[in-house]
Image: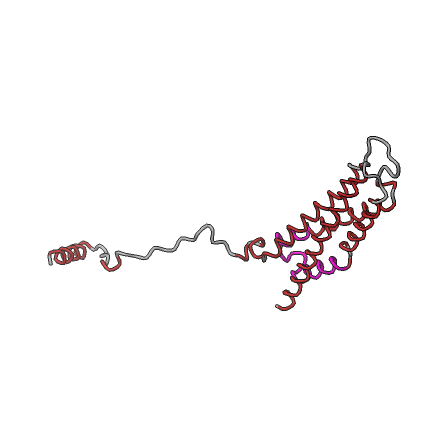
Amino acid sequence: MQEERNQSACKTMANINGLPVASSNNSTQTPFPTPSPFSISVASSGWNSRPTISYWDLFLRFVGLLFSFSSALSLVIISSPKKKHEGPSSFAESPQLLYCFIVTILAFAYSAFQLFKGIFDIAHKGILMSDLISDYTSFILDQVLLVGYLLVSSSSVAVAVVQEIEKSSPLWRATIISASFSLANFLVIATCALFSGYKLCKRISW
C-alpha cells in the first residue's frame, strides 16, 4: 500500500511539472538481438556453399599433381648415373622411358589445370561458367583426355623396361619409383573421374 501511494504521488508531481511518466509495466524490455559475428550467410561465401565432395575432389587433384611431379622428377634426377653401366644410362636414351616421362608431364599439366579450375570454381562461383557447365567440363575432360589410361600404359611399359636394366643401375631405381608414382596417380585420377560423374548426375537430377 505504501509503495502504491508513493507511485501515485510521483505521478501527481510529474503531471504538475509536465514531465513524461514512465510506465512500470515497461520497465523490463526485451533487448534487441545482437547479430553474431559468426552468423555469415552461406550464399556470401563460395567456400561454405560447396558440398564436401568438392573439397575431396580438390584434395585429390592436388595429390595427383604431386604424384605426377614426383614421377617425372625421379626419372630426371635419379637416372643420372655416377658411373657407367651396360644399357641405357638415362631415360632419354630409352624410347619406352621417354614415353613414360611424356605421359607424366601430360598428367602433371592436366592435374594442375583441374586443380586451378576447382579453386576458381569455389572461390568465384558462377562467374565465368555455371556449375552445370563446370561439372560437364570436368567429366568430359576426365573421360576424353584418357590421362588415366595413358598412366596405366606407361606403368606397364616401365615394368617391362625394368626387366631389361641392371638392378645396380640408378636408372633401375628411377624406373621403379616413377612407375609406382604413375600407378598411384592413376588411382587418384580414376577416383576424381568417379567424383566428376557423381557430381554431374546429382546436378542433372536436381
**Residue 189 image position (x, y, % from top left):** 71, 54
Residue 140 is covered by the magenta coloring: yes
Judged from this view, the residue extending furthest toward the top is 82
Judged from this view, the residue extending furthest toward the left is 2
Magenta stretch: helix, strand or loop mostly:
helix
Q: Say left or right for 100 vs 181.
A: right
Residue 80 figure quarter: top right
> Residue 195, relative to residue 71: is it above or below?
below
What is the magenta range?
Answer: 115-143
| Quadrant location of the C terminus in the rendered image | bottom right
Tell how many labels: 0
Q: Say left or right for 206 vs 42.
A: right
Judging depth in this view, the residue of 152 and 160 nearest the camera is 160
| Quadrant location of the N terminus in the rendered image | bottom left
Judging depth in this view, the residue of 8 and 16 nearest the camera is 8
**Residue 76 image position (x, y, % from top left):** 79, 38
Residue 69 is covered by the magenta coloring: no
**Residue 96 image position (x, y, % from top left):** 85, 47
Residue 170 figure quarter: top right
Judging depth in this view, the residue of 136 and 62 nearest the camera is 62
**Residue 95 image position (x, y, % from top left):** 87, 45
> Residue 61, relative to residue 81: is it above or below?
below
Residue drawn at point x = 88 percent, y = 40 percent: 93
